Image (cartoon, grey):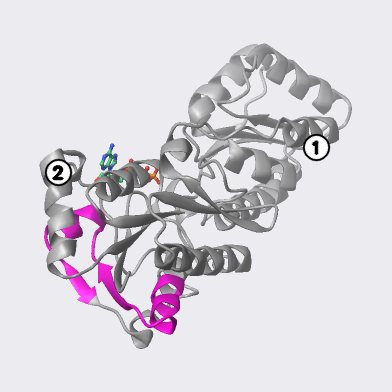
Amino acid sequence: VKSIAVLTSGGDSQGMNAAVRAVVRSALYHGLEVYGVQRGYQGLINNDLRPMDLRSVGDIIQRGGTILQTARCKEFITAEGQQKGADVLRERGIDGLVVIGGDGSYQGANKLSKLGIKTMGLPGTIDNDIPFTDFTIGFDTAVSIVVDAINKLRDTMTSHERSSVVEVMGRHCGDIALYAGLASGAETILVPEVPFDLDQVASRMQENFQSGKRHSIIVVAEGAGRGEDITRGITERSGIEPRVTVLGHIQRGGNPTHNDRILASQLGDFAVRMLMEGQSSKSCGIIRGELVATDIDKVVSTKKPFNMDLYNLALRLSQ
Ligand code: ATP
């Protein structure tokens, strides 16, 4: 591999810039040429690539979003679209590609590798829904944002002796709700991985208020239910009227935490070294401090296991 490209794809996440920076600087360090692809696979098909130098990734490690921009590209799901993408790379003499994104973006990388382009995937998503890595790039920052928001809600909830339902992101993976809920002392955490009974949620709230609790926070991952529906369900069952807050896209913005920057830096550099070794179609991750590369095929066909120990701990500590 002599020349590589890097792109960001799918939903953005904090730390994508730090990952792009790491890929570019590591590639240059190792004497490779490196190109940035604008707007994910759409930019690849449109031949929207530019050479990157050390300065083109200056002053971005601390910034949210992605300087390469991101897109969802229907054309790339077709065999013709993928062939166009591979042709663009080949015509420019680029033989390696680092894709920073989620599940869908990984599938795209997998297809390109079958067309002879060496590809590496970096898990860039706030959801932490990619297996074979403890954490994805952006997750730590998203959790911090949710914890910060709940701290603020708590202040006003306690003053008014009220309860709050906070809806957070996570369609299939409840990790943001789990980690933020545990870290902020939520009374109830609702996630798609664990079935729940609103009757129990409501009666627990009643009991806790009767036993002197002055506030109560329910964190719900969007995949477990809409905040509004949960709120209505609780009111119908208990007469308690929680206020609902939907955090939405705020969770995807802002400066990445040092954890996300370090993770992105390690994974970006690792991806470049793997490409230089001739590896392809692998997802880069860190498991218990160790860098690991796992076949993308395996990654996209495996569901990330849910951390029931942490969930049960949160339950025990939230009496
Ligand atoms: P997130 O989950 O954070 O939104 P993602 O990477 O899963 O990120 P998707 O929109 O699913 O986001 O995928 C991003 C892009 O990857 C798609 O717009 C498409 O161009 C490409 N892609 C998705 N699935 C495939 C596939 N099966 N084959 C080829 N390319 C794909």
Between discs 1 and 2, the one toward the N terminus: 2
Coordinates of residue 63 in the picture (x, y in percent):
45, 71
Instruction: Look at the picture and state if 267 lies above or below 135.
Output: below
Coordinates of residue 81 in the picture (x, y in percent):
13, 46
The quadrant of the image that shows the C terminus is top right
Pointers 1 and 2 in contact (CB under 8 A)? no
Disc 2 crowd, CA 10 A, few/some/many (<14, 14-19, 20+): some
Dot 2 amino acid type = Glu
- Tell whether circle 2 marks a residue whose Cβ is less than 8 angstroms from ligand 1: yes
Query: Considering depth in this image, is 318 or 228 the residue closer to the camera?
Result: 318
Secondary structure state at the residue bearing disc 1 = loop
Q: Is residue 23 magenta?
A: yes
Dot 1 amino acid type = Arg
Mark drawn on residue 165: none
Instruction: Look at the picture and state if 43 lies above or below 305.
Output: below
Q: Is residue 137 magenta?
A: no
For the point 62% across and 64% down, which residue is it? 259
Q: Nearer the viewer, mark 1 or mark 2?
A: 2
Q: Is residue 111 visible?
A: yes
Mark drawn on residue 75: 2
Direction front: furthest residue: 278
Coordinates of residue 33 in the picture (x, y in percent):
30, 78
Query: Considering depth in this image, is 274 or 285 the residue closer to the camera?
Result: 274
Magenta stretch, residue numbers: 22-50
For the point 18% across and 41% down, which residue is it? 74
Secondary structure state at the residue bearing disc 2 = helix
Mark drawn on residue 214: 1
